Image (tube, rainbow, N blue to C red):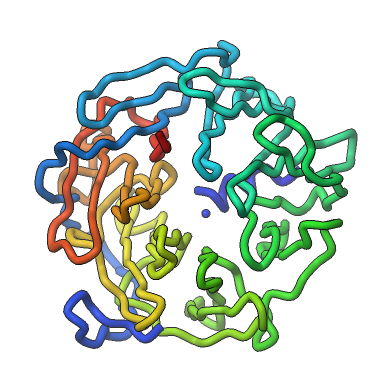
Amino acid sequence: MRVAVVLAAVAVVAGCTASGTAVPSPTAFARGDRPMAPLAGGPLTGSGLRLLVTGDRAYLLEVDSGRRTAIEGLPSGRQYWGFVAGRRTVVAAVKPGRRDPGRFHVLDGVRARPLADGVWAFASRDGRGVWVTRTAGSRCELREFTFAGTASRPGFPVGCDEAPFADSELGLLANRNDGTMAVLSRDGGRPLSVSRDEPGWQVLGTTRRPAVALVRSVGAGGRESLALLDPATRRATPVGSPATEGRSVVAVPDPAGRLLAVRFGDPAFPGPRQYLDVWVLEIGTLRWTRLPSMPVPASIKTASMAWTPDGRLVLTGDYVMTDKVYPAESDYASMVVDWRPGERALRVRRLPVARGEIAILAPR
């Protein structure tokens, strides 16, 4: 099973700036060492945010107070990771260094209740359950479960060279060994077309109301193209890219379905730093807004991005807090970022989280 491919995937418009002026064409990738300003913003207080923190341990963290609450009911001696499905939080427990299936748990308050065993899982599109990939010998199966742990539809075989990782308006998204993306039917897993206009589109994210998908295609010379795709007609409308030195990674819709927060990154920016850049696309006007303080040096594999129910964008991860091209380990800090569209500055707070632990926004 290409679990590594899935992990890499979840590591995953005519442009205008916040003031509405035209965005220049994308800049060339940087060459040579040069400084990059670190994350900056005002103090974050009274946020009401709660995070799930995972790694060698799993706990809930209240951002404002710093209070940690251990999650009850998880097996000990495991590696943990998690994700959000609708208004629920799911935590996986996996034996370190083993290829055995892990066990997925759904949180009821601060207690973890076993849900299903498998090698990977992701949220159902409607937020009412999870999809779990399981192996049986040389075969692989994908099945959807409710939060009660019962199958909500019959499972079906999937190629073990495919790695389903998301449920979208287009269908189930899966990464293949050859680097392409497949879209599969929820009933039976048959392949579906992504677009009628051009092959090779990869889906970055989708909204539900109105239903629209942001997709990308990489052409000759590595040049990236973006488009908005209508899931009903499979028609793609080309959109311009913002001025960034990163490649698009993932798009996350806001609760109203009007905005897509798009994360761009470069894992090999000059020096050992990595490049993180976040823009927000307004679907109705096709305008881009770059978040204040962006781009910044950060650890891409720890980066997380989500919207709160009241329309704030929250970023978490390990950020390089100096402008050094060759930062030391002590130059990294786990940070949480809070921003509301239209604001001219971020609000930031350092988290009491160990280097390498992953923090994600957790619903209450």
Left/right placement of residue 58 relative to residue 311 reads right
Residue 312 locus on image (x, y percent) = 29, 53
- In this picture, is 201 found above or below 335? below
Viewer-side residue, 295 vs 49: 49
Residue in the picture at 74% in, 25% down: 100
The tally of labels here is 0
Give residue 66's position: percent from left, percent from top.
24, 23
Which residue occupies 62% across, 85% down?
235
Single out the residue that lies furthest toward the left.
42
User: Would residue 180 be found to the left or right of residue 160 on screen?
Assistant: left
Q: In which quadrant will I find the N terminus?
A: top right
Q: Using the image, determine if residue 195 lies above or below residue 354.
A: below
Q: Is residue 8 left or right of residue 150?
A: left
Q: Is residue 286 above or below residue 276?
A: below
Q: Residue at x 17, y 79 (%)?
A: 19
Across and down, in percent, residue 191 comes to: 80, 67
Q: Judge whether 286 appears above or below 253 on screen.
A: below
Drawn side of residue 11 relative to residue 344, left or right: right
Nearest the viewer among 313 and 129 is 129
Residue 216: % across, % down: 53, 74
> Which residue is painted at 23% across and 54% down in the image?
339
* Quarter of the figure with the C terminus: top left
Q: Quadrant of residue 203?
A: bottom right
